Each structure stands twice: as structure tokens, then as C-alpha cells.
Amino acid sequence: MPFYRITINGQGICIMPKDMSALRLAMGGDNSSPIVGFFTTRYVHVPNRNAAADKAIAMVTKLWTQRPYSQMTIAAPRLSAEEIDQISLRGFLFGKPRKGHTFYGTDKDDQSSA
């Protein structure tokens, strides 16, 4: 079975500045607009591209139903696979990051990493 790296885009969340103020200040971001989405990357070992997208989205969905993410926003994110790349075993074993998010606000230049 092949290995895949999937970039997931999560949209439709609304995390208010008060909930992310420490993170935004640490990253040098603006504290006035809400977080409305994020990108995250996942690695999977599945038979094909469709299964890769489905598994990666399921992994992120599960994460966003647990704390602290489930407490930060009212609505669950709408998730889509932005990029699906087949990678080598080496890329699968040593690829980074394995977790974390890059959040974005209403202004496309406004991004904070977590």
C-alpha cells in the first residue's frame, strides 16, 4: 500500500480573540479578528488517494470533537483535502509535522501556528 501526505483545510470555525490571545501575541499576530480556519497535515498508509483523504479527514474530525478544540468553537470545522501527495516510506516515517495547525483569520495575511 502507498503512503500519503494530506493537507487538510478546516473552515467555518470562529475562535474569538480572547480564546487565542496568548497564542496570537506569541506569534506576533493581530488580536482583533477571529480565527476562521486552519491548515493541518496528516500522514496515512492506505490503498488509494480517496482512502487517504477520507482517513485524514476522519483523524482531524476526531481531534476536533475532543478538548481543547471542541471548547474553542461552537461549530465543527468543514474539512477538505487541499493536497494529497504520494510519498516514500522514508517521507512517511520521517515527515514533519505530525500534528498541529496553522490558523488563519478573516484577513489572509493573519496566520498563527499552533
Image: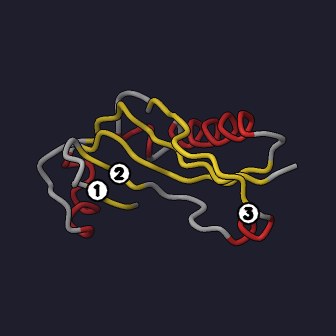
Residue 103 bears which disc, if any?
Answer: 2
Q: Tell which tag, 3 or 2, sits nearer the viewer.
A: 3
- State the image quarter where residue 87 is shown: bottom right
- Residue positioned 44% across, 32% down in the render: 77
**Horizontal side, residue 17 vs residue 65: left or right:** left
Nearest to the observer: residue 85 or residue 65: 85
- State the image quarter where residue 98 is shown: bottom right
Determine whether label 1 and label 3 are within 8 Å by CB.
Answer: no
Amino acid beneath label 2: Phe
Neighbours of disc 2 within 10 Å: few (<14), some (14-19), many (20+): many
What residue is disc 3 on?
92
1 or 3: tag closer to the N-terminus:
3
Q: Position of residue 72 (x, y in %)?
A: 35, 41
Residue 111 bears which disc, if any?
Answer: 1
Amino acid beneath label 3: Phe
Q: Residue furthest left?
A: 32
Determine whether label 2 and label 1 are within 8 Å by CB.
Answer: yes
- Residue positioned 44% across, 38% down in the render: 10
Amino acid beneath label 1: Gln
**Horizontal side, residue 98 vs residue 31: left or right:** right
User: Quadrant of the image for the C terminus?
Assistant: bottom left
Q: Position of residue 5 (x, y in %)?
A: 65, 54
Helix, strand or loop for disc 2:
strand
3 or 2: tag closer to the N-terminus:
3
